[in-house]
Structures are given as structure tokens and as C-alpha cells.
Image: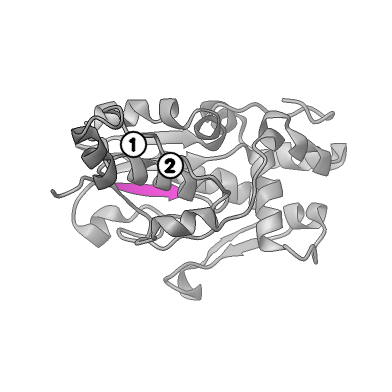
Amino acid sequence: MTEPQIKQFGLHRSGTNFLRVILQENYHVAVLSQEGGWKHGPYEVPQRLGRELDCVICVKNPYAWLVSLHKYRHPEKDMPFPDFVRSPIQIVGPDGPDRAIDKPNPVRLWVEMNEHWLSVKLESHRLFVFAYEKVLAAPRESIQELVTALKLERRVPLTHRLKTVVGAVAEEPEFFVPPRQLGALHDNYKKKYLAAGTTFDPGQYTRQEFFKEFTPDLLKFVNENLESNLVTRLGYTLANASGKE
């Protein structure tokens, strides 16, 4: 069968691979990360594919995202977090440095790229937005609107189908959720590599431990560079000086 395609967008460290794996491992669907344009770059689907696709945007709490991106870009901690937040940032994708994305600081990158993706107007397809925190908290429930709207069919492994025939298992297959924090994944990844990521504590989001990295002065800088309407639209709130939303 020809699987339906969805084009994915989202910044680094926004849960794009987590969502892609959940969708592809549980449903007959292909989530495109490189085809149709780089998932971290501008929307160029019609120009590159000659057609529209349903699209998904992955977002993360801006404060948590800044901490995560700093760890990703500076794993050796060669740049202090406050300096990273205030410094210019350049994102180079598969098209090379000539098409690099340059922003005055990571906060503006979060704002301007998410504003860009949200501004996409689709004529005959739908645009879905997924907050990483919600997908993490309820992987299956959080994607059901998309699954229903696009009429996605459950993916049933051959071994499960065979066991069902002989009455060894229930009809519904187990819902797969990645057991680890995922790093970069090729478009044609193999499932065995999904266990090769790093251990992950989702409580760091529910407990909002990321605010420990922010001083009141740094929070002020971040808030001044955020757009409150965008933050609210994506389901978040601006933090106060004590680091609480």
C-alpha cells in the first residue's frame, strides 16, 4: 500500500524525531524530515515537491528549549549558558552555508521560525501543531486528532498478526513509544537503533527544572525577545522573575 505522507517542521531539540517515530511505528504514514525541504528550515514544500502535504510543527517550551539547545550545541560547556542565550546564532542545513539561518540570538530563532511555520497557508491540507511536553506526557492521546483527521491506519507487525490468528494475543497491537531520548535519525532508520539513545527523565519538564539555569536578568532578556502573543498561541506563558510560568 502507498502510505500517506506528512511533512514535518520544528527546531532542533523540539521533539521532531520523537513524534516522527511514534507516528511511523504505530501507523501507516511517512513523516518527511528531509524530503520537501529541511525540517528545521523554511517551508518550501510546493517548490520542492510540486504539491501540498499535510504538515506538522513541533514546538517546545521556549525556556526549556533554550537549555536543551545549549546542551546540544555546546556539550563540552565551552560557552556559558547566559552567553549562549545572548549571542548570535547560525543554523546551517543540508543546503550549505549559503542558505544558513542567522538570528541575533536563539530566542529570536525560536520566535521567528515558529512564526514562519505557523503562517503557512494550505489550500487543501491541514497544519497540526504538537507541543513536545504534551506528546511526552500522553503519546497516544496527543496525536489522535491528527490520526482521526487523516484517517491513518494502525500498523500491525507481522508477528502480531500471526499470533492473533491463533488466538495468542489481543487484536490491538502494543502502542510503541521510544524508550530513550532520540538523537539524529536518518529518514530510513531501523527500529533497532531506537534503543541507542540516551536515558531521559521527562520529569525535568513537568518539574520545570530548566528554570534553574536562568537568573532574573537572563529571564528578563529572554522575555524581552519573546513575542507574548506567539507564546500564548502555542500554549505557554511568559515566566516571571522567579522562574515560574
- Foreground pick, 193 / 153: 193
Secondary structure predominantly adopted by residues drawn in magenta: strand
Q: Which residues are magenta?
A: 5-9
**Residue in the picture at 42% in, 48% down:** 9
**Residue position marked by numbered label 1 in the rendering:** 127
User: Residue 70's image quarter?
Assistant: bottom right
Give the crowd class for mark 2: few <14, some 14-19, many >=20 residues within 10 Å. Answer: many
| Residue 120 can be seen, yes or no | no
**Residue in the picture at 73% in, 41% down:** 222
| Colouring scheme applied when the structure was drawn | one colour
Give the crowd class for mark 1: few <14, some 14-19, many >=20 residues within 10 Å. Answer: some
Q: Is residue 198 above or below residue 54?
A: below
| Residue 86 can be seen, yes or no | yes
* Residue contact between numbered discs 1 and 2, judged by CB atoms under 8 Å: yes
Q: State the image coordinates of residue 165 (x, y, percent, origin top left).
A: 18, 34
> In the image, is residue 7 part of the stretch drawn in magenta?
yes
As drawn, the label of residue 236 is none
Tell me the amino acid under the disc marked 2.
Answer: Ile
Q: For the residue labelled by badge 1, is the local secondary structure a helix, a strand or a loop?
A: strand
**Residue in the picture at 37% in, 52% down:** 43
> In the image, is residue 200 part of the stretch drawn in magenta?
no
Q: Quadrant of the C terminus?
A: top right
Q: State the image coordinates of residue 156 (x, y, percent, origin top left).
A: 26, 40
Tell me the amino acid under the disc marked 1.
Answer: Leu
**Residue in the picture at 40% in, 40% down:** 119
Q: State the image coordinates of residue 134 (x, y, percent, origin top left).
A: 53, 30
Q: Is residue 169 above or below residue 186?
A: above
Q: CA distance from mark 1 to mark 2?
A: 8 Å
Q: State the image coordinates of residue 159 (x, y, percent, origin top left).
A: 27, 45
As drawn, the label of residue 57 is 2
User: Residue 229's image quarter?
Assistant: top right
User: Residue 151's image quarter?
Assistant: top left
